[in-house]
Structures are given as C-alpha cells and as structure tokens.
Image (cartoon, rainbow, N blue to C red):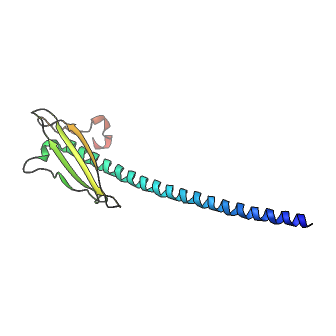
C-alpha cells in the first residue's frame, strides 16, 4: 500500500508539470496568433488605402480623357491639383500633362497622395497616353424613332 501511494503521488506531480507545460505552449501559440492577426489587419488596411488611391487616380485620368487634355492648359484651365471630394477628402491629387509634337498623344500622370495612420506619406502614381482632340465633335440629333412613339401622342 505504501508503494501504491508513492506511485500515485509521483504521477500527480507529473500531471501537474504536464498541465503547466501545456498552458505555457498554449499561451505562446495564442500570442503568435494575436500578433499575426494584428499584422494581417494592418496589411488589409494598407491594401484598402492603396485600392482607393488607384480608384481615385483612375477617376482623374478619366476626367482628363472626358474633358480633353487641352482643357488643362491656358487661362481657363481645369485644376491640376487639389483635395479629392468627400468622402475621400483625406486624399489629394496632382495631374501633370506633357504634350508631344503636334498630333502626338499627351503623357498624363495622376498622383494621389495621403497620410497613413502611422504618419507616413503614401501615394499612387499612374500614367497613360491620351490623344489630343482634333476638331469638334458635332452634337448628334436626338430624336425618337416614330415606330417607338406611342399611338396616343401621334
């Protein structure tokens, strides 16, 4: 009976050490998981800001394309820099245009800048070629074909 009690006390001591070691391993694993989660959330936020910057740069290039690059020079020029409209007022844009020889496309560059939550200045830079508008495009006649007009209006 004395031997059985000694074996039982030895086993309970080993079980206590096993529980302590398991708790330490679990604590280290949880600390690593929390650290990786924080890092992945930061990366996701940075990717989201980069995506918004790319979208705003694309919007500025589309505005140059729609208005025509010629509208960005001269006395009545469109603004080439400033703050983006709400809800993106934390972002600012700058557009640079460089014209080639006559008839050659403009090299248009849009830069979107913002300050990250950590205080670093970040930016997205996109450039493309946009052909100059030659002549004027006549406004098309907008009429409704008679076969589509309801009979009560004829």
Q: Position of residue 4 (x, y in %)?
A: 89, 64
Q: Position of residue 104 (x, y in %)?
A: 14, 33
Q: Is residue 111 above or below residue 88?
A: above
Q: Is residue 97 above or below residue 122?
A: above
Q: Quadrant of the C terminus?
A: top left
- Residue at the location (33% across, 58% down)? 116
Q: Position of residue 121 (x, y in %)?
A: 28, 56
Q: In the visual, does 41 lie left or right of 9?
A: left
User: What number of labels is visible?
Assistant: 0
In the image, farthest residue toward the right? 1
Q: Is residue 23 above or below residue 126?
A: below
Q: Position of residue 96 (x, y in %)?
A: 17, 46
Nearer to me, 66 or 20: 20
Nearer to me, 50 or 151: 50
Nearer to me, 97 or 37: 37
Determine the image quadrant of residue 61: top left
- Residue at the location (23% across, 46% down)? 110
Q: Quadrant of the N terminus?
A: bottom right
- Residue at the location (18% across, 35% down)? 131
């Amino acid at each position: 009976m004395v031997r059985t009690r000694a074996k039982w006390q030895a086993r309970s001591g080993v079980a206590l050490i096993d529980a302590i070691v398991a708790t330490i391993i679990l604590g280290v694993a949880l600390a690593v998981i929390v650290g990786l989660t924080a890092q992945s959330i930061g990366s996701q936020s940075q990717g989201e800001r980069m995506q918004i910057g790319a979208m705003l740069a694309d919007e500025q290039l589309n505005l140059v394309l729609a208005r025509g690059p010629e509208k960005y020079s001269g006395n009545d020029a469109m603004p080439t820099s400033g703050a983006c409209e709400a809800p993106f007022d934390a972002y600012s844009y700058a557009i640079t245009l460089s014209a080639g020889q006559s008839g050659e496309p403009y090299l248009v560059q849009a830069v979107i800048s913002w300050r990250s939550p950590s205080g670093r200045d970040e930016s997205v830079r996109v450039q493309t070629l946009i052909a100059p508008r030659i002549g004027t495009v006549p406004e098309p006649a907008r009429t409704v074909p008679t076969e589509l007009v309801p009979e009560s209006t004829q």
